[in-house]
Image (cartoon, rainbow, N blue to C red):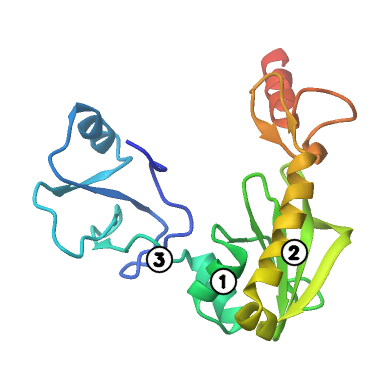
Amino acid sequence: MSGRLGVQLGRICPECGREDSVPLIWGLPGFETMQLAERGLVALGGCMVPGESPVLSCRGCGLEWGRDGDPTADEQALSDLLGVRFADVVRALGSGWRREGSPAEDGVEWFVSGEPAQVAIGVTGPWFVLARPLTRWYEDRLDLHIADRQQFGREDLLHCPEMVAMAADEIASRRRRSFRWCRSCRRVHPPEWFVGTERVCQDCEAQFEHFDA
């Protein structure tokens, strides 16, 4: 099966408020799906698929809820801060936004999108800034590449979404060009997750140190 398994990050159950919901699978389950359900990575909804079938099941209270395309809690928070619909955010900036740390001292609330983070948006009042994010390994702290900052207003997002989308795409493209492969875990990481010219990310370095201890 395709899609992310296990607990869906940012999906807050509207009944109990827990972030403990997994994908809800409808239809006759196969052997692999049954194994995933036994491990708690998915839930089984039944063989008969209802017209408006929920896509998530809360492991805490059992509520079956959600629809494809619903915003996460962080995505809804971003929409609320901007004072627009989530559909307007998706049209101009795409989806996958997650809150990054606590609000800054100047009141700006930051969100990032992409994995690794490729675009950052900081919101204060009707204004928002797009920037290239610099995330720190194992630190809940966001730095920004000063040269890439571009400021927009809510009206730009609503009436000129193509302009906003182009700016976000340019920032994401520059960010992706800086990514490096770790020769140990074979995963892509941002350059700040490596030490100097080392080709091993800090995650793997930490594991090596643990094994040597």
Which circle's residue, 2 or 3, is located before the other in the chain? 3
Q: 53 or 74, which lies in front?
A: 53
Quarter of the image for residue 167 reads bottom right
Quarter of the image for residue 120 reads bottom right
Q: Please state which amino acid type lies under the numbered disc 1.
A: Val
Residue 140 visible here: no
Task: State yes or no: discs 1 and 2 in contact (Cβ < 8 Å).
Answer: no
Q: 51 or 65, which lies in front?
A: 51
Task: State yes or no: discs 1 and 3 in contact (Cβ < 8 Å).
Answer: no
Judge from the rendering whether residue 162 lies leftward or rightward of residue 191; answer left or right: left
Element on which disc 3 rests: loop
- Image point 29% across, 43% down: which residue? 42
Q: Residue furthest left?
A: 48
Element on which disc 1 rests: helix
Residue for badge 2: 167
Residue for badge 1: 89
Element on which disc 2 rests: helix
Which circle's residue, 1 or 3, is located before the other in the chain? 3
Which label was assigned to residue 184? none
Viewer-nearest of discs 1 and 3: 1
Residue for badge 3: 70
- Image point 67% across, 16% down: which residue? 211
Quarter of the image for residue 62 reads bottom left
Q: Is residue 2 above or below residue 165?
A: above
- Rendering coords of residue 58 (x, y %): 30, 56
Viewer-nearest of discs 2 and 3: 2
Q: Is residue 80 above or below residue 7?
A: below
Q: Please state which amino acid type lies under the numbered disc 3.
A: Asp
CA gap, disc 1 and disc 2: 14 Å
